[in-house]
Amino acid sequence: MIDFSVCIELAFGEGDRPFPDRVRAAVDAGFPAVEIWDWRDKPLDALAAALDATGARLLTLCAEDWRNKCQLADRQSHAEFVRRVRDTAHIAVDLRAPKVVVLAGDVVAGEDIAEQRAIAAEALAQASDEIATLPVELLVEVVNREFEGPNALLPDTASALGLVRALDRPNVRLLYDRYHAILNGEPLGWAIAGDVERIGHVQAADVPGRHEFGTGTEDWVGELRWLINAGYDGHVGIEAMPLGESDLLYRGAQSLLRQALASG
């Protein structure tokens, strides 16, 4: 059954609340799981203590430094990429987090795109092997082109899913971020229909603005209904900057889920 997690980089930060306190606030609001981006700037011992004390699950964290992404089309970056994945995966194990998010970076100008994606697949295969004995999977994410730029090696869900499908590794799946997909012009279900088992996680926020469900133009009852009917039964991570109170996020999302279930 679908449930919801929340990105505490964007929510529950009112008053510059420390991250361990954001975990406690998210749990108090009803969330069973939370997500973070970069772990390197977090008080990990205090974060672990908050997770233990509340029973919350840390669901995802990122291997990449968004300001200095590895460019997987360039083999020179692969050793650094594998190191980042290895280091992040061990932190994930310490925090009992099952999913590590990775990016592919940009195209190399003037080179064949298919060959570049094959080179990126080599890096993901190396990283997959590096963490094969750990209870962690890699999630390949596509970010909207407005944010990431026009030269993304994986510009849409179809290209990322094609790479994941070609790798066919049990510990490499797709992060299906509906916020980014909508901004990239992707209709609901495009490219993933019939391949939902390759989705390791879903994230979402309303469009425009990246705020909570109901603040924009998207039909989230329809979105959730599609996921349910397609057989997705994981978390939907709310990765949104709330316009209202963070404390209301879970209640609002659950209301939409009940409507989706009722409308079948």
Image (tube, grey):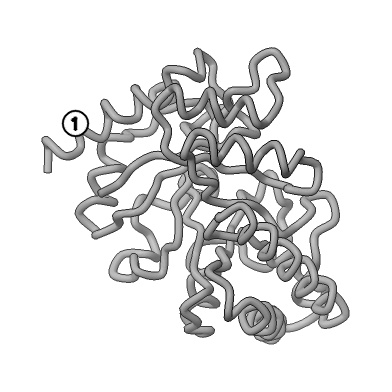
Above or below 53: residue 1 = below
Above or below 84: residue 97 = above
Mark 1 secondary-structure assignment: helix
Report the label total. Answer: 1
Q: Nearer the viewer, residue 200 or 229?
A: 200
User: Could you say which quadrant of the image residue 120 lies in?
Assistant: bottom right
Q: Residue at x 42, y 63 (%)?
A: 199
Q: Residue at x 73, y 70 (%)?
A: 86
Residue 204 appears in the rendering: no
Query: Where does label 1 land, which residue?
Result: 259
Q: Nearer the viewer, residue 109 or 20?
A: 20
Residue 24 appears in the rendering: yes
**Apparent side of residue 209 relative to residue 204 in the rendered image (left or right):** right
User: Could you say which quadrant of the image residue 82 lies in?
Assistant: bottom right
Query: How many neighbours does mark 1 have within 10 angstroms: few (below 14), some (14-19), or many (20 or more)?
Result: some
User: Could you say which quadrant of the image residue 259 lies in?
Assistant: top left
Q: Residue at x 64, y 43 (%)?
A: 48
Q: Which residue in the rendered view is the most extreme toward the right?
A: 76
Q: Position of residue 205 (x, y in %)?
A: 48, 35
Q: Nearer the viewer, residue 193 or 169?
A: 169
**Kind of residue at disc 1:** Gln
Q: Position of residue 226 (x, y in %)?
A: 25, 49
Q: Quadrant of the C terminus?
A: top left
Q: Residue at x 71, y 25 (%)?
A: 18
Q: Position of residue 218 (x, y in %)?
A: 38, 33
Above or below 15: residue 201 = below
Q: Position of residue 98 (x, y in %)?
A: 52, 60
**Apparent side of residue 227 relative to residue 8 in the rendered image (left or right):** left
